[in-house]
Each structure stands twice: as structure tokens, then as C-alpha cells.
Amino acid sequence: MKMKKLTSLLLALIMVLALVACGGGGGESEGGESAQDLHISITALPTIDPQQFNSASSYVVMKGIMEGLVRTKGNDVNPGVAESWEIAEDNMKMTFHLREDACWSDGSPLTANDFVYAFRRLADPEKGFSYSWVLYEIKNAGDILYGDGSVGVEELGVYAPDDHTFVIEFDTPAPYYLGFLDMPCFYPVKQELVEQYGDEYALAADKMLTNGPFVATEYLVDQSVTMVPNENYWDRESIKLDKCVVDIMESEAAFALLETGELDFANIPVAVAPAYLADNSMLPDCTVESYMSGAVDWFCINWASETNPILGNKDFRLALNYALDREEYIKIATNGLYAEGTRFVLPAVAGTGGKTYCELYPMDVYKTTAETDKATEHLQAAMTAMGISDPSQITIKLKISDDATAALIVENCQDQWQRNLGINVQIEKVTYKAMLADRVAGDFDLIYAGWMPDYDDPYTYLSYFVSTNSQNGGKFANERYDELVNTANTYPDAETRLKMYAEAEQILLEEGGLVPLQVRQVPYAYKSNLKGFGRFYLGSEIDWYNCYFE
Amino acid sequence: MKKYVLKRIAIAVVTILVLVTIIFLLVRLLPGDPFTSEKTNEAIKAKMMAYYGMDKPLIEQWFTYIKNLLHGDLGVSLKYPGRTVNDTIAQTFPYSASLGIRSIVLALAVGLVLGTFAAQNAGKVMDYVCVLIAIVGVSMPDFIIGTLLQLIFAVKLRVLPAGQWTSWDCKILPVVALSLYTLSLITRLMRSSMMEVINQDYIMTARAKGLSKFEIIWRHEIRNAILPIVTTMGPLTAAVLTGTFVLEKIYAVPGMGKFYVQSINDLDYTMVLGMTTFYGIFLVTANLIVDILYGVIDPRIKLADGGGGKKRKAKPAAAGKEA
């Protein structure tokens, strides 16, 4: 009898637990769905504090709830909080004229001092904001961020002569800076709120103030954000959506939810993308497209390798480049989705006169297919110089992170180099964080690397290989290259500047500074009745603020 | 009994302390560091290390951590600026717990019925069907089951949502996918345990007394056969809770799993440590409850531990080590 009681007790306990569980967890779906409700997803949203910005995918939300001095849309730099601006001839000073009626979402005035405070906050060396490097070109920023502490944040080259004028002064000319200012870390913050909430600032929707086209009504860290139009926004009439919900989830889950119609947009996993791109009807009511995400991938070569001195040999590096059939591996590994990369700067980066930089300065140092004769020739020269008789005596290691697509690409490169050159190639897989650390530390032979642009200028790519850059772990060092890249910005004339960049890039390629691999294409799908939806290789990966359903 | 419980609690505390220390050291042995990223530089990295107190000697950091832990403070995340680990757990654990508990309840309910049913029909077709279900459930990993269910019921048939955790129908697929493994284990365990009981003399006695078949199953067979299930509930809870990680990812459930897995990739030391400690405490407590419950249900354990007085029976395995 006692045992029976206990068993029933146990069962009752389980049932109670189950009932409790039913009560907790997960807000039920809200009613009142409108035809102008957008539901999208991104992969990460670590913070919505502008200066704490540390993940490219949070751009999507940040640009919805906030607005900087300017607002970029594709290549265009449009007015944001600033109505107009002047840039000094020598690119050493920018003056912004803020809207007279600029205000926060609660209607309180937004002044130039809010920008001064935001810039100074970002420069605070005590805080260690991960994106504080963006300030580097601004007057005194280097001394404030990396100095001995004798230069305070008040000396940063940003000023507010009056409430509606904001001035930036530079230490080095930064012709690309205007569009760059749309990066979330440059967005304004209200001093009294930051001081009031301290470490808790922006941890909840009501613990911050925003000024963008939308306001967040609900925000759960790295889970979801619900946004509705900001009634006090200066361009309120251009906003047609009634609501936008951004959920944070894995891209595979997002794609499943797009297929069942619960999301209005999702990226398509690379592995299955070609089928969907070929047959649009596989996703009913959806438009399938792909766009150049801005990422270029390449193998970083360790010039200074102590264990593998042959990597310091120019002929060997060229042999690696010539032996690679980029068309072939892209076909196998990505079904032809990615574009072959034969240079370092993204093909889409702006040049002058409506042409891209790459159109203005074409380069044919490497081809998309293999040039095996040239490869063998250079390999022979390298072996003679290094005193090696047989290519099988050469072993190189390729280091990659645990990314499925990257692994497939690198395995193909391994195969091609072994076939076309007869050398031994090994693959070493490490975690993503370990790969980053090893790359900076120079602990590799060849390491798989990717780069996203920060602004629409070749400098965002080419500055990587300047010998003094701490990110340049392969220790590529060329005096002429450094001179060209470091001084190009001092020439106000855009054509001269781009020409210098082109010369630098040519040197980088001819020296075998890297093994360019590919330009990434990201396939995606969205509801066909969704209009005004855009994707661009810079800034926010999704441009949704002016979207509407037809 | 009181002595037994106290001893178990003391062991649980030591276990957690050892766990925290091991994870504290292990996570720092992982190659890389939390602040190196594509877009930062060494000088900024050093500033960030200093900001989070990671430039201090390891032993000092450990003492600080333990001190904060005793106050229930699991620290601040390195990846989510300003966000405490406590807040993250408070936000996400209810989802994981909701998914986990529903799955355990489903697994218990269905598993016990299927197991009993199979044992009653031993050797017949229905037995084979139940055993087949159990074998499939045990052999298929949850990520395959999860993906398959999603493909069939959400993408192809469009009868259920493909994910998220909002309306009631969103919850069906992840709960079923997560419970299948546990359900199968319980079915098999219940079946074999039941088969053993069926052949006992007291069942024959019961039958001879003229009790109805239902009464025999309910009052004599199930009650005796269920004991081994109770012992396995501790480890099974662990299996279900870690299983939620994978299914949360597939079904976009905003639970702890994503933060846990992602924080290891991001080397978010405090988050890894905090979540592991939290899970450690949770699982150790679950095992503790099972141990105590087992003692309550099986009176022999109580006797063996000196609660009664007459020590005549052999000590059961579960309490053997501690007694």
C-alpha cells in the first residue's frame, strides 16, 4: 500500500512539473497581424549599444533603430541626421550640418553634442570597445587609444561649434570616411542615459534612446527584436511597414521557416543553393537571387615561416598560384556559385566616373584556370634556389577553420597542388578562434582567410598587407607597397589615389603575396510581393527600412 | 536516512567545485582568445583583456570567480557586452526546460505504456512492433530525427510549423524528436523488467487468488517493474537536457543551447563556465533527487543505510558506494 502511494506521488510530481512547464517559457504569438508586417532573421545580435557594436550581422537591426550622420543605401551616401556636409579639399576636415528638428524617438532634441559624446565614448581606452580602431584617422585618436594615457578623450578631433554643427578633424586624410560614418559604432548616444544606466545601457528596449526610422518595442538579447515605426522620425512618410520582427537563429533553421512561409526572407545554404537558383518554382511565392556579399577569400602565405623557408621564395609562391584551377574547384565545391578570385580587391568596389576600381585597372597576373607550364617552371626555379631535387620533398600545411564550404574548397586545392606540382599538401583543421589567433601570430604555412570591406574603397582591402599592420600575420613586406598604400590618401585627386592603389595591388600579386581564391556569392530568397528589399556588399547585409508588401 | 542525504549533498557540492575548476582551466587551454577577431588589433585586445580582468594571474581570477559564484554571480559575458550570465540563463533556460520536461513526460508516458504492452504480448506481432519502434528510436540520433520530422511534417506536408517556440503547435515536432530516444530506452527497459516480474511466484499467487488481469498488471507487475526506470531517470534527464541543444538549433528554439555552443566557439570564457556550472548543479541535483527517491521507494536501501535497525539484506548497487 505504501509503495502504491509513493508511485502515485511520483507520477503526480511528474504531472505537476509538466503543467508548470506548460505555463512557463515562450511568449505566445501576438494577435493583430497586419499586411505590412515583416518577419526576418539574422544569425547574431550580441548588443544594440552603438559603441559596443562587434558583429556585422547586428547592422541589420542597428540601422533600423538608429541613424548616424549619413545613411548609406548601396553606393549612395544619403543625408541622415546631417542634412548636408562639406569636406575640406585636402580631406582633413568634415563639417556636418545637422537637421534643425533632429530629435530622439521621445521627441527630445538631438544635438551635435550627442555625437561628440558618442565619438569620445568610443575612444575611451578604459572601455576597450572592440571597434575603437575605426577612429584611428581622427585627430589624436591614435594617442588616446594606444598612447600612455597622457592624451584624454576630450582632445579627440570632434567638435560641436553649435548645436547643429558637427566637425571632424583628421590626423591623416581619410577620403573614404563619409560612407564609413554609417557604421553603428558612430551612431549617437544620449549622455545622461548612458550615465544613468551604466553597464545596463541598451540591455533592454527601455534602457536606451534611439533616433532611427524604427523603435524597438521589445528586445531580448540575441533572441529577437520587435520594431515599429518611429513617429518622430524626420522621414516618417517614407516608412511603409507597420512592424518588423527580427529573430536570431541559425541560417538552416531560417531557411526551413522560409520554406514554410513563416519568414519573409532567408539565406539559402550554399550546399543546396544551385538547385533553388536554377528552378525558382521550388520555393512558391518567393524570388530567389544571389548577391556579392563583399567577402573575398584567399590563402595567406607565411613569408617568414621558420619551419618552411620555401614559402619565402617568390617562385614557389607564384607556382602555387599558377597551379590552381579556380574554375574547377569552384565548380566542384560550390556548384559554380562563387566567382573566381584572381586579385585582392573586391570587383565591385567603387572607382571614379561610374566605373568600378577593377574595371578601371584590370589585372591579369593570375588566371581563373591553371597554367601548369608556368607553374612547373617556377617550381623548378624555386627548387634550384632552395637546393631541392624532388618536389615530393616539399610539404606544406593548409590551415582552415571548421567551416564545411571552406573545407571542401581547401580539399580541392590540396588535390590540385598535389596533382599539378607533385608536392605534399596537408590540411590542418582548427577552431575559428584558433585560426584567427594563429593567423595574427604567424603560426601557419598557408591559412584560409576571408575579408569583408568596411567602406567603399580599395584601401579597406589593401591596408591589410601593410607591413606595420598587426593583422598581417604572413608578414608580407614590400617597401614600395607600404609607400603607395600609406601615402595614396594624401592625394586629394581620386584618380591619382586609385592609380597608386592599383600599382600596389599589382606588386602584391606579382610578388605572390597571397593566393586569391574566390569572391563569395550569397544565395537568398524573399517573398515575391516584398518590394524595396535590397542587399549590398557594404554595411547592413539587408536593406529593409523602406520595404513594403504589395 | 538523514545521514545518507547529508552525505549525498556534501558529495554534490564537492563535485560542482571540481567541475568548476576543471572547466575554468580547460576553457583557457583552448587555442585562441576571446578578443581576437577579423577586425581588431593587438592594442585593443590588450585593453579588452584588462577591462575584463583577464590580465591578472590565473589563480587570482579563479579566486574571484569562486567568490562571486558563492554569491550566485556567474559573471559578465565577454561576447555580449554588459550582459551577465545570470540574465542569459534567466532568459533562455525556461525555453530549454520547457522543451526538456515536455519530452521527458512524453517519453515516460508513452514508454511505460509501450513497454508494458510489449511485455504482455511477448512474442506476438504487437511486441515486435513496439521493439522495432524502440530500436529505431535508440539507433537514430536526434539531429537526424529532428531534421526528418521537420522535412516531412513542416516542409513537405505543411501540417506543423518548421520551428520557433511561440504557439502550441510549434512545440510538437521538437518535443517528439527529443523524446524519441528516451522513449525507446524506457520502452525496452520497461519491457525487460516487466518480463522478469511476470515470471515471479507472487504473480502466480495473485493469479491464483483470482485477481483480475488489470489488477495484476497495475498493482503487482507495474509497481515492481518500474523501479529500474526510476534509477535511470537521472542519467536520462541529462541526456534529454543535452539533447535540447541540437534540437533548439534545428527548430530555432531560443533556449540555452545556442548560447552554450556558441560561447564555446566564441571562447566566451565566463559564459561557458557559467552555463556549465549551472547545468552541473542542475544535473547533480537531479541525480541527488533520484538517489533519495530510490531510497524512499525501495525500503531495502533505507535499511542498509542504518535507518531501520535490521541489516539483513544486501546493499543495492545505487547506494553501495556511499554506505
Image (cartoon, helix red, strand yellow):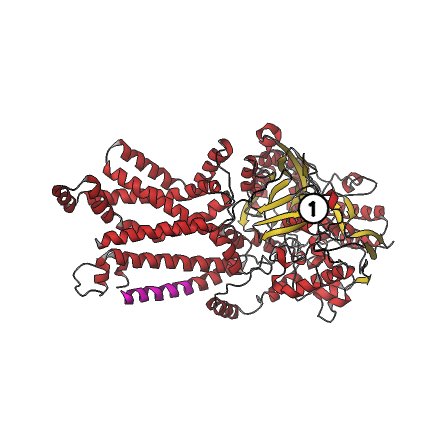
Kind of residue at badge 1: Gly
Name the one closer to the observer, A398 or B16.
Answer: B16
For image coordinates 39% across by 44% down, the residue present is: B179
- Is residue B9 a member of the stretch shown in magenta? yes
- Is residue A114 a member of the stretch shown in magenta? no
- Report the side of B197 relative to B246 (left or right): left
Instruction: Assign the magenta stretch its main secondary structure.
Output: helix
Q: Chain of mark 1?
A: A
Judge whether residue A453 can be spotted in this image: yes
Identify the residue at the far front of this view: A32
Residue bearing mark 1: A512
Is A326 situated above or below B312?
above
Judge whether residue A378 can be spotted in this image: no
**Residue B90: % across, % down:** 50, 57
Question: What element does badge 1 sit on?
Answer: loop
Q: Quadrant of the C terminus of chain A?
A: top right
**Residue A544: % across, % down:** 68, 42
Name the one closer to the observer, B214 or B32.
Answer: B214
Name the one closer to the observer, A66 or B29.
Answer: A66
**Residue A210: % across, % down:** 69, 55
Tell me which corner region of the image, top left, top right, bottom left or bottom right, holds residue A412: top right
| Magenta-highlighted residues | B1-18
Q: Residues within 10 Å of mark 1 (few under 14, many from 20)?
A: many
